[in-house]
Amino acid sequence: MTKSLIIYIIDDDDIYQFTAMRIIETHQLAKKTFVFSDGEMAIKYLINNVGNKDNLPDIIFLDINMPIMDGWQFLEEYKLLKPKIEKKIQIYLVSSSLNKIDLNRAKDISEISDYIIKPVKSEKLIGLIEDLEKKTGNI
Amino acid sequence: MFLIMLEELPASLNEEERLRALYNYKILDTPKDEKFNRFVELASLICGVPISLITLVDEKRQWFKANKGFAFNETSRDLAFCQYAIMDNNILEVEDATKDGRFKDNRLVKDDPYIRFYAGQPLIDPNGHALGTLCVIDKEPKQLTDFQKKTLKYLADGVVELIIERWEKEELEIFEKLFNSSKDLICIINENGFIVKSNKSFEKNLGLNVNNKAEYTFFEFIHSDDLLSTKDEIYKLEDVEEIKFENRVQTINKKYLTIQWSCTKDDVTGNLFAIGRDVSDIKKVESDLEILTKKLQNQNYQLLNYAHITSHNLRSPVSNLSSLLYLYEESKTKEDKEFLFKKFEQVIKQLSTTLEELMNALIIKQDINIPKVKLNFTDVILKAKESLIGQIILSKAIITFDFTEVNEIEYPKAYLESIFLNLLSNAIKYRSDKRLPTIHFQTKVLGNHIILTVKDNGLGIDLIKNGDKLFGLNKVFHRHPESKGFGLFITKTQIESMNGQISAESIVDVGTTFKIIFNITGND
């Protein structure tokens, strides 16, 4: 497996952080993984690394419910930042919420590639990342 | 046969209408009346005869409203000289009945009282109906002078006027009874707004001094907030015939009734006729319904909030457990399994805390009949300070309070203590390192409510971003090791279960002010 992708995990739940990291590490899915406990930490890091492709993600796994700055607020800030970022970033909204309001809201945001409901299984994560690697390889 | 009938019972062509007119005056079979007696006394004096009558000719009889010198109060119609008199507008004079084919066989002529002379002046009402006569009778043949005939005519006119006057007075009395027995507020208002006439209900409810009615204006009873709208409505009467509107009117007991008015204007005098119905009870039902709807909406909202809580706060740890279980099964070494087991412990602890808090909230919701006791705000804050003494010393927080306006409240003890403890510990927890923390508690009275404000100079919260989540479960807004976010959720649940409200104003890096409205009257 080529380790070409950079992944951001933005989630305040440390158990989730741990399980996701464990899957990524076990299956060697990423070149680098960054973990942020809330949206604000992540957006600040993105701003500071706008020109630095080595620290910009290919994939963001974004939680909805977080303190300080939640997933929705992060997306608002991200939209403003997006024109300055030269890398194509896939954002997956990850939540334990089955709330229809959340699902519909996610559909209306073009920056979101998909909505994943927790718990995230390793097969799902592997399939998703492999697909993306193929795509980026083709480009 | 027909001809004989005609001769025996003469009747005018509009007999039906004439009878209707007579019955309408409602005078038949009424008691004797001095005012009417004067006319027969006068007629007999002037004409120099022993008998004079005011007769009213019914379908079957003639009835006497006034009777001078005659033995009966009524006779059958076939005996009546008057039935002939009412066929004409002019006086009917019979000089000698024994020589008149119409009367010579009449029992009253052949027998007692042996009538010889009769003169009857018809009583013609303004619509031309002859109701009966003013008549004079003698036992001797006689002839009236022109002067006597003329006088009889004038007297008859006077009798008709009296009949009409009597009837109008009676009608008025009926209306007066209707006017005064009505529970509605009825009044007549002149162009300058003064009350010209009002009914008993109006006077009783609003406390009008009956003797000085004219000194009151309609507008002085109206709630000041409704004055403009009332005047606007009355203006509309320039263009429309009737207006209907509502306003609040102050009663003698200084209470306000909600009155639904219906108003018309008398174009001749410019007076307003106003009829008002007290709809306060209906209004109260409406407002009760509104309160109930609000309560239901609120409960519905809380249910949604619970759905949200189960979705996030319960599903998250459960999904973590299933992820951990998967990793545990994949795990190959004993050390790793032990390491993962520690993670299980962490999630289970988190899950049980969340469940416990949720249970607490549900208990509060069910426990709407929790007993209220008289509490002292000063005692409650001192107790809260005591519980948090360690944190207060550590943070050097200056805690002040002003409960001079109101220091007492009836409230569930555990709730008030929990509310104070949570607000105080929150204020200390989210203090700013840049300045000495100050926290001020204050109470005020506003109508039926006690307002508690808790003002700090701490970190503040961006309410534009986070306002909707401030009182949610597990919501935190700061990277703080002790942040847990349970406090405000429980605080809000407790306050709302007692029909109160909590809100916050905050500026980032300046401070936060929480405002709690305690509903003293409760929900009953």
Image: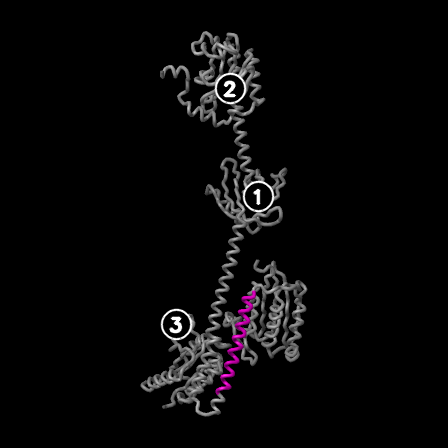
| Quadrant location of the C terminus of chain B in the rendered image | bottom right
**Residue B515 versus residue B223 in the image, above or below:** below
Give the residues drawn in magenta, as a range.
B340-367
Gap between marks 3 and 1 measured at Cα = 61 Å
Q: Nearer the viewer, residue B237 or B121?
A: B121
Please give the residue where the numbered disc 2 appears in the rendered image.
B74
Give the chain letter at badge 2: B
User: Residue B452: image x %, image y %?
Assistant: 61, 66
Residue B324 within the magenta-colored segment of the rendering: no
Please give the residue where the numbered disc 3 appears in the rendered image.
A108
**Residue B286 versus residue B444 in the image, above or below:** above
Residue B341 within the magenta-colored segment of the rendering: yes
Q: Which residue lies furthest to the left in this view?
A: A138
Asked where in the image residue B70 lies, by quadrant, the reply is: top right
- Total marks drawn? 3
| Quadrant location of the N terminus of chain B in the rendered image | top left
Q: Which of B298 and B318 is in front in this view?
A: B318
